Amino acid sequence: MSDSRPVDQPQNDALRAHLEAWLNKQNQTLLEEVLATWQTALGHFHPDEALLAQLLEAAAVPSALAPSDPQDSRLASALDLLEGATSQGDLLKRLLDALSTLVERSALFILKQGLASLYAHRGFEADAPSRAGAGVPPSELESLIQGSTHSIRRKGPGYTALITPISSFEASDVAIFALRHKKRAVALVLVDSGLRQSLDYPEQARALVLAASAMLASLVAGKEEDSRSHSLPEAYPSAPTPVVTEPIIQAAPVELDSKTRAAAERLARVLVGDVELYFPAEVSQARIRGNLYGQLRNELERSRATFVERFGEEIEARYRIFTTTVIHQLCNGDVSKLGAVPWA
């Protein structure tokens, strides 16, 4: 068999080697020239005075074209007024003072035992009363009190009921917010436009009320901490809790219509919830000692009187709605913690 490799193959390999060597040398030379040119060009990458002046001018433009928002400035000033509140009463006073920088008129109503009582106001007529009798909030305000809505921005029975004790003049634009503690409405805050057509800063006013709610929680937590420092001796927490096998509450007759029962249960929850909200240390001690009525007799009697005034003694005697709520909310469902009660 003959060899198929061309006889001139060694000569071709030699030519290829010379050609590759020349190309490599030229590439190396070109690369060195490119690097030298690049290094020389780097020396020209220094900003001159004209460029620096342009950059400084461009950097100054945003601050000149975007001045601070006056709404943000007003809210910041209003929040500053809330700072430093030392008590719940001081916080409420500061809240009204702060609101006066955002709205024309404002008023605050304390919610307690199912009633709304005027606490103080700003911007109303000189002869407007600083205090007024308590009244049951209209049903229109129920969604706000229960937390299903964050504000009311319309005139209606709710606004009229709140404004009537203070002024006979109703503004054209209004807002009502809830001041809350532990998700429970403890006060209603009313603001309106006074003689103006509309409120200038309604959302800022709402933000201020939310900030006051957060500060209220902090103040109450501090007060509860102080109360715990004077709490019961260590022997009490370890005492066993008596258990009563038979419930004290009998089944309620079915004659009570659902609408009346729902309203009565709602008021009972509000009344009992106020006792728990405003007397947390006393409720805690009463649960441990098992004498809730003895510890909170006056508060429970006032709350029950409010319930009976609204729905009648007969309904409470037959259906035990208020009593059931007390046992459920304040005694954790354990009737033995209620103690001796004349109406239970």
Image: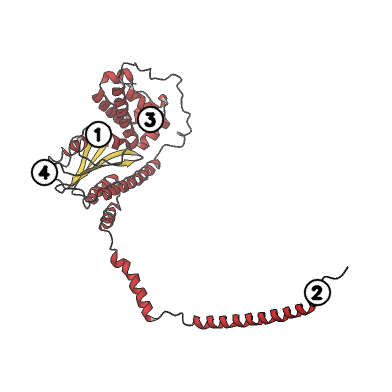
Disc 3 secondary structure class: helix
Mark before the other along the chain sequence, 2 or 4: 2
Q: Residues within 10 Å of mark 3 (few under 14, many from 20)?
A: some
Q: Residues within 10 Å of mark 4 (few under 14, many from 20)?
A: few
Closer to viewer: mark 2 or mark 3: 2
Q: Residue type at mark 2?
A: Pro
Q: Residue type at mark 1?
A: Glu
State whether residue 344 is above or below residue 6.
above
Q: Where is residue 283 in the image (x, y as percent from the top left)?
A: 37, 33
Q: Mark 2 points at which residue?
A: 6
Disc 3 to disc 4, how far (Cα)?
Answer: 42 Å
Q: Quadrant of residue 4?
A: bottom right
Mark before the other along the chain sequence, 3 or 4: 4
Mark before the other along the chain sequence, 3 or 1: 1
Disc 2 to disc 1, how far (Cα)?
Answer: 107 Å
Q: Mark 1 points at which residue?
A: 140
Which quadrant: the N terminus?
bottom right
Disc 3 to disc 1, how far (Cα)?
Answer: 26 Å
